[in-house]
Amino acid sequence: MNDQSRLTLLERDPVTFEVVRSALYSACAEMKAVIMRTSFSPLLSLSADLSCALMDYQGRIVAQGNDIPVHLGAVPYTIRAALAQFPLESWRASDGVLVNDPYSGGTHLPDMSLICPIFAGGSRLMGFSLSRVHWPDVGGIAPGSSSVSDHIIKEGLRVPPLRIIEGGQVRADILALILANVRVPEDRKGDFNAQIAGAERMRLRVLDLVERYGADTVADAMRDTQAYSRRLIESRLAAVPDGIVDHAEPLDGDGVGEATAPMIRVRITKQGSRFKVDFSGSDPCAAGPINAPIAVTASAVFYTVLAFCGGDILPNEGVYQLAEVVAPEGTVVNARYPAPVVAANTETSNRIVDVLLAALAKAYPDKVPGGSYGSACVYTLGGTNPASGRPFVHYETVGGGSGAHPSLDGASGFRVHMGNTMNLPVEAVEAALPVRFIAYEIASGSGGAGRRQGGDGVRKVVEILTDDVAASILGERTNTSAHGVAGGAPGVTARFRLVSASGETRELSAKSGPHRMRRGDRLEMVTAGGGGWGRPGEGEGS
C-alpha cells in the first residue's frame, strides 16, 4: 500500500495522534524552560528572549513553543540554509550547527540559532531541534550589538552555518573565535551551554515518544500535524469573503539619514484559501539598520495569517507553506548584503504587521485590531560596573500600546505582535548594574479613543550611576501614529530624549546612538499608544 492510499495517523488513531502531537509541542516548551533555567543572561532567564522548535527529518517545522513569532517564522529559512551547507546525509548523532547570519536564514546577528539532529536507534534521523537565543552582545560598534550603523559588518560577528559540535564535542577553536569577538564572553559561553542543554532535553523527549509509540508512529504524527494545521487554515480562509486590499506606510527613519523615511507598500490578495502578500513597490534598502531580511518579512506575514484566522491553530510548516510572499530583493523588506538589519527584527517587523493589518481593515474591519506601538523599543547600555570592575552589557525591550479589537480594549504596556518577551524586573537590573530607574509607568491617555480604547504606551526613565556608559535606542512611531480602525482614533506618538545631570535636554530620533552618558544623566523613553476601534459612543448600547 503506497503512502497516498494509506490512512493517516489522524484518521486511523486520532487519540494517539493528538497525544503525540501535544507531546511534541510540550517538548518545545520544556526545551525553552531548560534554557531559561541554565542561561547566564537575565534577558533569557527573566525576559525569555528565546524560542524553540522541532523539525522533521526533512527540516520541516513540526512544532514550536509559544515563543517569539519573528524567531519562529524564520525557522524554515534557517534550516534550509543549514541543510544547504550540510546535506542530510552528512549529519551524525550529537552534531550541532550554529548560525546567526541574516543572509543565510537568520534574523539579526544577536539571535544565535543552534540546530541539532535527533537520531533513533543510532541511525534513523527523526528530525532536528532548533533554539534561537538572543545573545545580549555579538560584538560590533556598540554594546548590545543593537545601534545605528550603515553596514552589517559594524553590527557584529556574522556566523554562517558552521558545525560547532561534532560527535558530542564542542569545537573549542570555533567557540574561542566567536567568544573573542563578543563583549562579556563568559556570559555568552554560559548562554551557549544552555542551548546545548535545551537540545539534549528535546532529544530525550522525542526518544521517549519513539520508545513508547514506535518511530513510525512518531514520524506519522510529525507529518500529519503539518497537514492538519494546513487544512484548518485553508478552511478558515475559505470561509472569509475574497478581496484585494493594499496599504502603504513610512518607517520612522533609519538613524543614518534623518530625512529618510522608507515606505512599505503591500497588496494582499485573498482568494479562496489562497493568501498572497505582495510587497512590490516598497522602497529600496535604507542606509541604516531597518532593512528586513526575507526571513523576517515572511515571519510577519505568517504571524498575520495565523492571527487573521483566529490565533488558535497550532503553527508549523503546514501553515507557513500556505502564505505566498513576494518581496523584491534589495528593498527594505528583502535586504541585500551588506545592508544593516538589526532594527528590522524588532522594529520593522512590527511595522510590517501593522501595515498588513491596516490593509486588511479596509475589507475586514470586524476581524482585525487597530495599529500597535509598532516596536520593541530596544535600548542598550554598556560600560564597566564599578562594583565589580567587570564590563557589562544591558539589552532590554519596553512595552507599549496594542491596538483595540472589535470586542476588546487594547492592552497597555504590552509587547505586541512579533515579540513575546516578558518584563525584566527593575529590581533585578538595579541589583546587577550601575543604574537607577526613576520612572516606570503607563503613559496614561496615549491610546487612541474609540468604541474600544487603544492601549496606552509606557514611560521609562533610567539614570546612569557611573561614568562613560554607551547607550543606544531603536524605536518606532515617533512620526507615524498607530492607526485606528472603523473610525477609531490613532494613538499618541512615541518620544525619546536624553537629560543630562545638569538638566539639559536633547530630543532623540527613533533610532540613535551610541550616546556617551555619565553619572546623573538620564534616558527617557515614552512608547506610543495603540489605535482605537470604532467611533466613540457608537455601537454597543448606542
Image: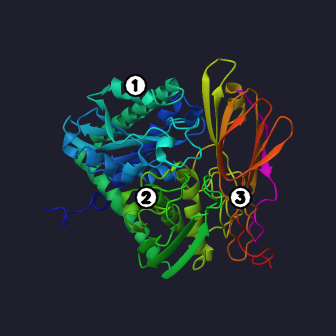
Is residue 336 something that shows in the picture? Answer: yes
Looking at the image, tell me whether mark 1 or mark 2 is earlier in sequence order: 1
Q: Where is residue 35 in the image (x, y as percent from the top left)?
A: 48, 34
The span from disc 3 to disc 2 (Cα, nearest Å) is 25 Å
The span from disc 1 to disc 3 (Cα, nearest Å) is 41 Å
Indicate the amino acid at tag 2: Ile
Which residue carries the number 3 mark?
478
Q: What element carries label 3?
A: loop
Indicate the amino acid at tag 3: Thr
**Residue density around tag 3, few if under 14, some if 14–19, many if 20 or more, within 10 Å:** many
Looking at the image, tell me whether mark 3 or mark 2 is earlier in sequence order: 2
Residue 294's label in the rendered image is 2
Which residue carries the number 1 mark?
176
Q: Does the magenta run of residues contain 445?
A: yes
Looking at the image, tell me whether mark 1 or mark 3 is earlier in sequence order: 1
Task: Please give the range of residues in magenta.
Answer: 434-453
| Cβ atoms under marks 1 and 3 closer than 8 Å | no
Of the 4 image quadrants, the one containing the N terminus is: bottom left
| Cβ atoms under marks 1 and 2 closer than 8 Å | no
